[in-house]
Amino acid sequence: SVTEGEDAIGEVSLKVQDNGHIITGHGASTDIIEASARAYIHAVNKLIQIRSEG
């Protein structure tokens, strides 16, 4: 976690691979499931941006 205590903020970093691209995503929340979802959404949004540019 990034902080300590009952309301500690957990941080998630992940990688998503698509057609040779490796995209990283990061998320943070007091709820680790929410942090994971935020990280995945971050990675997918970056992938959408890459696809729209090229």
Image (cartoon, rainbow, N blue to C red):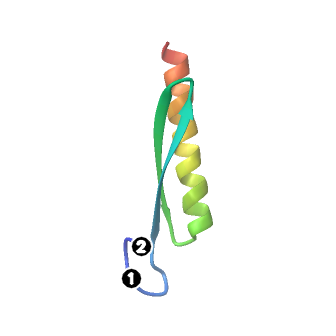
Looking at the figure, which quarter contains the N terminus? bottom left
Secondary structure at badge 2 equals loop
Please tell me in which quadrant of the rendered image residue 31 appears: bottom right
Q: Residue at x 49, y 12 (%)?
A: 54
Secondary structure at badge 1 equals loop
Q: Does residue 9 appear to the left or right of 33 in the view shown?
A: left
**Count of picture labels:** 2
Q: Are marks 2 and 1 in contact (CB under 8 Å)?
A: yes
Image coordinates of residue 29 in percent, x first then y, are 51, 66
Residue 4: give its label.
1
Q: Residue at x 47, y 34 (%)?
A: 22
Q: Residue furthest top?
A: 54
Q: Which residue is mark 2?
A: 1
Image height check: is 47 above or below 35?
above
Q: Residue furthest left?
A: 3
Image coordinates of residue 34 in percent, x first then y, are 60, 62
Image coordinates of residue 17 in percent, x first then y, are 54, 35
Give the amino acid type for the residue marked by disc 2 in the picture.
Ser
Q: Residue furthest bottom?
A: 6
Image height check: is 8 above or below 18?
below
CA gap, disc 2 to disc 1?
Answer: 7 Å
Image coordinates of residue 43 in percent, x first then y, are 52, 41
Q: Residue furthest front?
A: 20
At label 2, counting other C-alpha atoms closer than 10 Å, the crowd grade (few under 14, some 14-19, many 20 or more) is few
At label 1, counting other C-alpha atoms closer than 10 Å, the crowd grade (few under 14, some 14-19, many 20 or more) is few
Q: Residue at x 48, y 16 (%)?
A: 53
Residue 30: give its label.
none
Give the amino acid type for the residue marked by disc 1 in the picture.
Glu
Image height check: is 2 above or below 35?
below
